């Protein structure tokens, strides 16, 4: 691996007051530090091998399959159960009770007895039980639009229609991928010492990566069953254009607020990567060429980005204009001379939309794997280490943190109904997380603690009135209702990006901003909101399949030594 | 049934909140159930016991009044979920040499995870004692001396918490952290689930349609 000499100290990280705003978090793009890319780089580097010990699926698409991945120390197997789901039962919501396919990621290679046990539980999802031998639980539904089309075309000996493939992007979309101890699965703490699971969400990403392989095999199998004489498989480059979809509702939104240390570490790593690149004194010819190619490919990605949601259509339109503007700026030679990346980023601040600025921030990392990829190891968090409140802190110090971190909230008029219009709550119906209207529905008693801004202001008022012993310990003994926000504030004091610096219960809140932030760190592309609180995305679109991880160059003429450029589509003129 | 530690923590937090504790204390109660369970101790059932015992009681009746002298609750028995949090908040004072005496305390075993938190915050070794039992918690683990049957006492007349010298090689089985699924008796789990149920909003058609906002058709 080549090393990059840092010619000058990394520039400063962007301020949390800039980064931790919902509008910006809702404009993030995947990058080299996204969890899918981290997983694929590892599998390639460590020469993982893959096999399919079981594939017993009938002509109706019902049966069982097992996909195993073998790393240096451990093997993992996706156990897939394919079902015949009546169309009227198909729903992406948590409240669904049946799916087209259900999955678990097994720790090792399952025996027949394991598969038998799992067959009684995995298809029931939340209503079943798994064990510490399983690492995840998930399900997926077909994209009715595309699935039937592809089976029909393949059975007739034809390739799927490219436009239809691009319009949807996937054959199935997962609707929940549960990990970390849910429904009896192994706790994250039990496996996070394994190098392959150090980076967050690697279990979930591995599960989805193998799910994609299963779904493509399934569709080709069904075509073969329908017409053994004429059926064909999908041509490899075209096959890679299928990702796996994901349909995500509000369940993911509270996660970012509930895991302040984790979100801090993700953002710190991305910001550090950006600062390292901005700190470079010069860009080499190769680096400039590669960057320009990736800008063109990002432009193509924006061209292929479909959404019916008015806000997203507007954002994609701005992104396209921004990328065109960026290309023109590049053509004018902006990368020549000293500190080219810092100058480019500063130019973007003045000339591009937030969507465009964040796309640029991700793109700037592309030529610099050797400089930034190591940061992926710092994205995990030992959340226990920051859990305990420091009661010995002086109360005026806690009050000062409120001014520094929650200044945005202190400036809000909390007596206005709009400022507190929403309530985050959990329905007893399959424990589906929901967002309600505080002044219209009887849901306030069920409110979840997901409004740090409001809570910080409440605590500030009580601190200002406090006349007792001036310690956090004494104050919290008298005001236990502030323990939650006191803990957060102390975490935020140590970790600058721990807190979202916006009102999370205002009438103007767009929950999709929270969803997109998290999904971008997964590595998702093609965000397609279905409402203000529901989004569909594509995962692993363009990625190699398991059997291709070691060998396939997914890029184009530019040499990507690590093969890690699959997440931007190839340019039309070099596409095969 | 067997549960993962994450499930026990999540259930403990929801149950404690359902029983009326503020969110911050509920978060710590969930951690406490997890910490004990990971060491083979009955964290979930003790939590179910204390929540049942103190259900409908106000915080003020169960919390220590005068924290400069002996800690005592107006209602008679201190709640370990409240007193534990207050103890942990005084971690630096204990590490600095202060001995804290608690009067009558319910389910004193539930104090341990909070003392462990104080150890984590300060790096000090701290001993907690009631009846004929002394539990010493250090950054390297825990050791138990004396009458083990007192571990699960329903209450203690008084509890002392003081700095201590580290014990060599804490080899007690209770210090072996279990990371696999752990059994919890069905009755305790049901009691916790009943408390947890109180924090979930009743299902209504309006909430079903609007609250999750799936929006456009999700069957396409």
Image (tube, coloured by chain):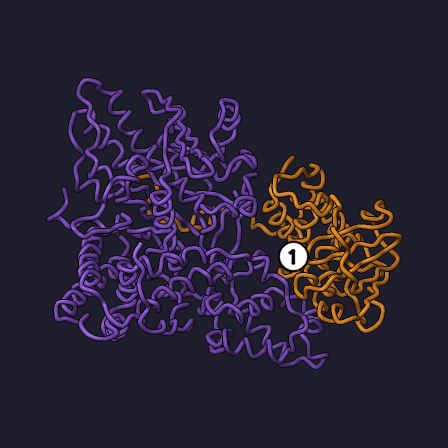
- Residue at 33% x, 43% y: name it: A44
Q: Is residue A253 above or below residue A103?
A: below
Q: Position of residue A214 (x, y in %)?
A: 34, 32
Residue drawn at point x = 55 percent, y = 60 percent: A449
Q: Is any atom of residue A532 visible in this view?
A: no
Q: Is residue B104 above or below residue A157?
A: below
Specify the subunit that label 1 lies on.
Answer: B
What residue does disc 1 label? B26
In the displayed structure, does residue A510 sit left or right of residue B118? left
Q: Residue furthest left?
A: A573
Q: Quadrant of the N terminus of chain A?
A: bottom left
Q: In the picture, residue B185 is in which quadrant?
A: top right
Report how many numbered discs are placed on residues in the image.
1
Secondary structure type for disc 1? helix
Q: Seen in the image, is A377 located left or right of residue A148?
A: right
User: Residue pushed farthest top?
Assistant: A229
Residue A326 occupies quadrant: bottom left
The chain painted purple is A
């Amino acid at each position: 691996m080549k090393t990059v000499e840092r010619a000058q100290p990394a520039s400063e990280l962007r301020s949390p007051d800039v980064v931790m705003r919902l509008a910006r978090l809702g404009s993030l793009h995947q990058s080299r530090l996204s969890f899918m890319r981290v997983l694929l780089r590892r599998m390639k580097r460590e020469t993982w091998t893959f096999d399919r010990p079981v594939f017993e699926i009938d002509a109706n698409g019902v049966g069982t399959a097992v996909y195993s991945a073998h790393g240096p120390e451990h093997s993992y197997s996706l156990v897939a159960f394919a079902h015949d789901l009546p169309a009227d039962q198909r729903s992406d919501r948590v409240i669904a009770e049946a799916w087209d396919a259900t999955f678990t990621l097994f720790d090792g290679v399952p025996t027949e007895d394991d598969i038998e046990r799992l067959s009684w539980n995995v298809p029931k999802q939340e209503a079943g039980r798994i064990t510490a031998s399983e690492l995840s639980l998930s399900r997926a539904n077909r994209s009715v639009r595309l699935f039937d089309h592809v089976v029909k075309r393949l059975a007739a000996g034809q390739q799927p229609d490219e436009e239809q493939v691009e319009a949807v992007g996937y054959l199935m979309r997962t609707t929940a991928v549960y990990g970390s101890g849910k429904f009896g699965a192994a706790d994250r703490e039990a496996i996070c010492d394994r190098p392959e699971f150090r980076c967050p969400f690697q279990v979930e990403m591995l599960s989805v990566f193998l799910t994609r392989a299963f779904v493509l095999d399934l569709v080709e199998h069904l075509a073969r069953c329908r017409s053994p004489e004429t059926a064909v498989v999908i041509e490899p480059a075209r096959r890679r254009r299928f990702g796996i979809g994901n349909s995500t509702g509000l369940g993911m939104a509270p996660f970012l607020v509930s895991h302040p240390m984790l979100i801090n570490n993700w953002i710190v790593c991305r910001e550090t990567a950006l600062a390292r690149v901005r700190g470079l004194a010069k860009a080499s010819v190769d680096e400039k060429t590669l960057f320009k190619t990736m800008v063109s490919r990002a432009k193509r990605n924006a061209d292929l980005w479909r959404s019916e949601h008015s806000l997203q259509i507007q954002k994609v339109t701005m992104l396209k204009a921004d990328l065109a503007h960026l290309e023109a700026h590049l053509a004018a030679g902006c990368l020549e001379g000293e500190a080219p990346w810092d100058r480019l980023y500063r130019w973007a601040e003045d000339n591009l939309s937030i969507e465009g600025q964040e796309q640029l921030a991700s793109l700037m990392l592309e030529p610099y794997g050797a400089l930034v990829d190591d940061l992926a190891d710092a994205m995990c968090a030992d959340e226990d280490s920051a859990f305990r409140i420091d009661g010995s802190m002086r109360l005026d110090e806690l009050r000062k943190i409120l001014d520094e971190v929650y200044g945005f909230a202190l400036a809000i008029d909390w007596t206005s109904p709009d400022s507190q219009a929403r309530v985050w709550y959990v329905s007893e119906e399959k424990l589906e997380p929901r967002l309600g209207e505080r002044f219209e529905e009887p849901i306030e008693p069920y409110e979840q603690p997901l409004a740090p801004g409001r809570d910080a202001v409440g605590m500030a008022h009580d601190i200002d009135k406090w006349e007792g012993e001036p310690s956090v310990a004494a104050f919290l003994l008298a005001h236990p209702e502030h323990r939650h926000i006191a803990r957060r504030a102390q975490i935020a004091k140590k970790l600058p990006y721990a807190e979202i610096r916006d009102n999370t219960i205002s009438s103007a809140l767009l929950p999709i901003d929270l969803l997109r932030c998290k999904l971008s760190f997964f590595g998702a592309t093609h965000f397609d909101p279905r409402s203000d609180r529901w989004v569909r995305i594509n995962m692993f679109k363009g990625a190699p399949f398991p059997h291709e991880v070691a060998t396939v160059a997914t890029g184009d003429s530019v040499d990507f030594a690590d093969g890690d450029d699959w997440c931007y589509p190839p340019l039309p003129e070099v596409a095969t | 049934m067997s549960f993962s530690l994450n499930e026990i923590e999540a259930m403990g937090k929801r149950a404690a909140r359902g029983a009326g504790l503020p969110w911050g204390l509920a978060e710590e109660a969930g951690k406490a159930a997890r910490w004990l369970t990971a060491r083979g101790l009955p964290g979930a059932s003790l939590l179910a016991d204390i929540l049942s015992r103190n259900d409908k009681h106000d915080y003020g009746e169960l919390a220590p009044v005068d924290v400069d002298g002996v800690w005592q609750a107006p209602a008679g028995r201190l709640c370990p979920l409240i007193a534990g949090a207050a103890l942990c908040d005084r971690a630096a004072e204990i590490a600095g040499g202060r001995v804290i005496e608690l009067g009558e305390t319910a389910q004193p075993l539930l104090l341990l995870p909070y003392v462990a938190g104080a150890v984590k915050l300060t790096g000090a070794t701290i001993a907690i004692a009631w009846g004929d039992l002394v539990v010493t918690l250090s950054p390297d683990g825990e050791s138990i001396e004396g009458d083990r049957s007192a571990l699960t006492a329903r209450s203690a007349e008084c509890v002392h918490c003081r700095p201590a010298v580290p014990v060599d090689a804490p080899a007690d089985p209770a210090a072996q952290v279990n990371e696999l699924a752990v059994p919890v008796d069905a009755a305790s789990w049901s009691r916790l689930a009943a408390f947890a149920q109180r924090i979930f909003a009743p299902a209504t058609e309006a909430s079903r349609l609007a609250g999750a906002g799936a929006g456009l058709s999700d069957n396409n």
